[in-house]
Image: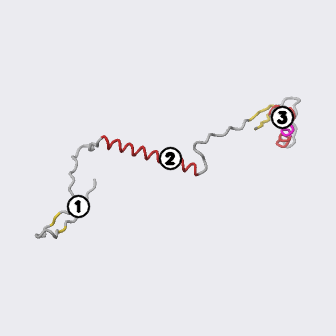
Amino acid sequence: MAAVMTTPRSDPRCPSGEMTRPVHLALVPMPPVGLGRLPRVSRTTYWRRRLAVLLGAVIVVLAAGQAGAALGSSPLAAPGRPPSVERYIVRPGDSLWTVAGHVAPNQDPREVVDQLAEARHNSPLLVGETIVWQR
């Protein structure tokens, strides 16, 4: 609860020089004091307040989306397709050429063999070893 205190001053229009209340201030009756009971508001005031809160929430969500987009991430962007990983366990008699045919059947095997040899530092294949190939 807040109160306003003013200092009364004499009104020059009043010949007696008595102190009067300023014209622009009016007394407002205090609501009846109850145990935690608030004064009732009208239905239109109730719905206007709810609408104002909803509008404020929408503005905050839109501002957060704009801030996210400005920082470089798109809030509605679909994630890209994850890379597929192919695993192959080396069997007796396998070579880099047969492994290349299994892990990347739709690619030129010469490029895959070169990449496998480079990744393995030209070491020989061991039986039971797992080769992981990411497409």
Query: Which residue is at 84% across, 34% downward?
Result: 100
**Residue highlighted by disc 1:** 24
Q: Is residue 84 magenta?
A: no
Quadrant for residue 40, please give it.
top left
Q: What amino acid type should be assigned to the residue bearing mark 2?
A: Leu
> CA separation, marks 2 and 3?
50 Å
Secondary structure at numbered mark 3: helix
> CA separation, marks 3 and 1?
92 Å
Which of the marked residues, 1 or 2, is nearer the chain's N terminus?
A: 1
Residue 87, given in percent of the width and then of the height, sits at 77, 33
Query: Which residue is at 18% across, 62% downward?
Result: 21
**Residue highlighted by disc 2:** 62
**Residue highlighted by disc 3:** 100
Q: What amino acid type should be assigned to the residue bearing mark 3?
A: Ala
Secondary structure at numbered mark 1: loop
Name the residue nearer the viewer: 5 or 63: 63
Q: Which residues are magenta?
A: 107-113
Left-right relation of 20 to 50: left
Query: Which residue is at 64% across, 40% downward?
Result: 79
Q: Does the residue at mark 1 contact the one at mark 2 (Cβ under 8 Å)?
A: no
Q: Residues within 10 Å of mark 1 (few under 14, many from 20)?
A: few
Left-right relation of 88 to 76: right
Residue 45, given in percent of the width and then of the height, sits at 32, 44
